[in-house]
Image (cartoon, grey):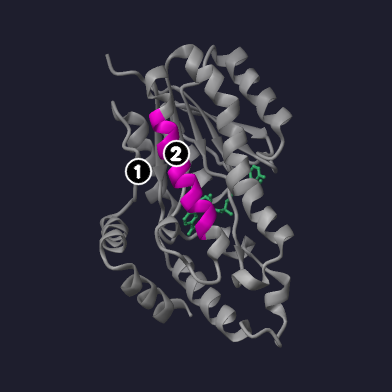
Amino acid sequence: MKEQVKTVLLTGGSGGIGAATARLLAEAGMTVYAASRSGKAPEVSGNGTIIPVVMDVNDEAAIASVVSRIIGERGGLDAVVCNAGNGIAGPIEETSIDEVQVQFQTTFYGVVKTIDACLPVFRKQRRGRIVTVSSVAAVAPLPYQGFYSAVKAGILNLTKALAIETRRFGIQCCSVMPGDVRTGFTAARKVAVKATDKNSPYYEYTVKGVEAMSKDEREGMEPEVIGKAILRQLRRRRMRPEVTPTFIYSFLVWVIRRFPQGVVLWVLGKMYS
Ligand SMILES: NC(=O)c1ccc[n+]([C@@H]2O[C@H](COP(=O)([O-])OP(=O)(O)OC[C@H]3O[C@@H](n4cnc5c(N)ncnc54)[C@H](OP(=O)(O)O)[C@@H]3O)[C@@H](O)[C@H]2O)c1
């Protein structure tokens, strides 16, 4: 019989892709624990329920307490969606190690910490689904967002390796790779301090590149498109290991992987550098 996803822990549920996903999953009848630092969550109509929770994905104790609360209230957990993330822009040379660590904190270690808290539950249940939100930037190395690209490539590969390791315990893993999405992500993006100095040798290229990428995001798709893709995977008997929503972005990923990498870097350079 097809296992049904009823209870979901979703991180970054207060805005953007997370809020849209929480609403869609809840409207599909699921109970969604929507976690974020602010603890805000969207309104929902219909049968489903969104339970807002204050949870910083950098805080292991807070994650453990939310997971045990869910088990206490719901008797189990069917899926986790690791979506919380942020971006830091700046040339690689001018991004300090402290800034690199900030980039990895929420968007990589936060995902690892959330998954770690759920895995013992999923193994015990002998079922569970893990969805991570990566990015097309995982396969398209973005200039002036090199560390963001690195983090998202890490998340993508981590998810696939985890899929192999946990298959024998009945656990499924899927990484969703959004292209440009219109959310608060663009305004929240930080720029490496050194790169804001007008005397930086990268200054004008960074400004131009980040502005072009920000424009693409502002004109990007609605977050519901990604939410629908996540919902589709949670409803499938077997989740795909990797999903790129919309035909155009999945075609782009296909092209990037098949074309000579020199050509890919040349095109990305023309677009953003
Ligand atoms: N927008 C795009 O074009 C795009 C493209 C590809 C991939 N993505 C990825 O999609 C994911 C969601 O991004 P978005 O576009 O929806 O951005 P967003 O609108 O800025 O939303 C980010 C969400 O993460 C939460 N968050 C941030 N830090 C957190 C922390 N430490 N602990 C818990 N929650 C935290 C925020 O809530 P609080 O501030 O309340 O904590 C917010 O709900 C990210 O992983 C991003 O990298 C976005």
Q: Is residue 217 above or below residue 53?
A: below
Q: Position of residue 259 (x, y in %)?
A: 26, 66
Q: Position of residue 167 (x, y in %)?
A: 38, 24
Instruction: Assess disc 2: are there few (<14), some (14-19) or many (≥20) residues with their C-alpha within 10 Å of its C-alpha.
Output: many
Residue located 37% across and 36% down the image: 231
Which residues fall within the magenta stretch? 149-164
Q: Which residue is mark 2?
A: 159
Image quadrant where one finds the N terminus = top left
Which amino acid type is marked by label 2? Thr
Disc 2 under 8 Å from ligand 1? The reply is: no
Q: Which residue is mark 1?
A: 242
Q: Position of residue 22 (x, y in %)?
A: 49, 38
Q: Position of residue 41 (x, y in %)?
A: 60, 40
Residue located 60% across and 69% down the image: 92
Instruction: Tell me the number on the disc at residue 61.
Output: none
Is residue 41 shown to the viewer in this render?
no
Q: Are marks 1 and 2 in contact (CB under 8 Å)?
A: yes
